[in-house]
């Protein structure tokens, strides 16, 4: 609940990021104000590497290639 990494997206506003607790409270306030409910989703971080980048990373870390 108190770990960052969440995003609230509503049709009529910009996305807001923060903790799950903060976003649930914000969504509740919006609902009480008559606004449409938004969507709360966990923000994912992904890194895509091609094979050359992976091999360079292995070499940098001193791993056998």
Image: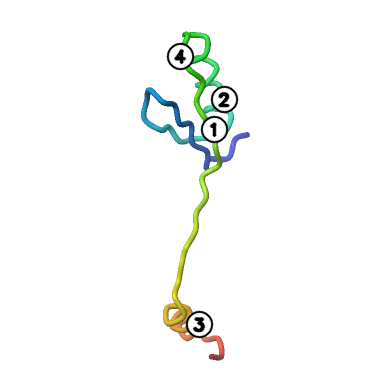
Please name the residue that numbered disc 3 is placed on.
Answer: 58
Q: Residue 58: give x, y in percent of width and height.
A: 50, 82
| Crowdedness near tag 3: few (<14), some (14–19) or many (≥20) residues, C-alpha within 10 Å | few
Mark 1 element type: strand
Residue occupying the point 46% across, 14% down = 35
Rendered position, 23 above or below 36: below
Q: How far apart are marks 4 and 1 (CA)?
A: 15 Å
Q: Residue 43: give x, y in percent of width and height.
A: 51, 45
If you read the primary sequence from the N terminus, does the residue marked by circle 4 or circle 1 appear first? 4
Looking at the image, the residue that sits furthest to the bottom is: 65
Q: Residue 59: give x, y in percent of width and height.
A: 47, 86
Residue occupying the point 42% across, 82% down = 52
Please name the residue that numbered disc 1 is placed on.
Answer: 40
If you read the primary sequence from the N terminus, does the residue marked by circle 2 or circle 4 appear first? 2
Say if mark 2 contacts mark 1, CB within 8 Å. Answer: yes
Mark 4 element type: loop
Rendered position, 27 above or below 59: above
Q: How far apart are marks 3 and 4 (CA)?
A: 50 Å
Please name the residue that numbered disc 4 is placed on.
Answer: 35
Please name the residue that numbered disc 2 is placed on.
Answer: 24
Q: How far apart are marks 2 and 4 (CA)?
A: 14 Å
Q: Position of 61 compared to 11: left or right? A: right
Q: How far apart are marks 1 and 3 (CA)?
A: 37 Å
Which is in the foreground here, disc 2 or disc 4?
4
If you read the primary sequence from the N terminus, does the residue marked by circle 3 or circle 4 appear first? 4
């Amino acid at each position: 609940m108190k770990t960052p990494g969440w995003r609230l997206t509503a049709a009529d506003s910009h996305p807001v990021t923060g903790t799950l607790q903060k976003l649930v409270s914000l969504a509740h306030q919006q609902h009480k104000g008559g606004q449409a409910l938004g969507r709360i989703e966990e923000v994912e971080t992904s890194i895509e590497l091609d094979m050359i980048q992976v091999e360079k990373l292995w070499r940098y870390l001193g791993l056998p290639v």
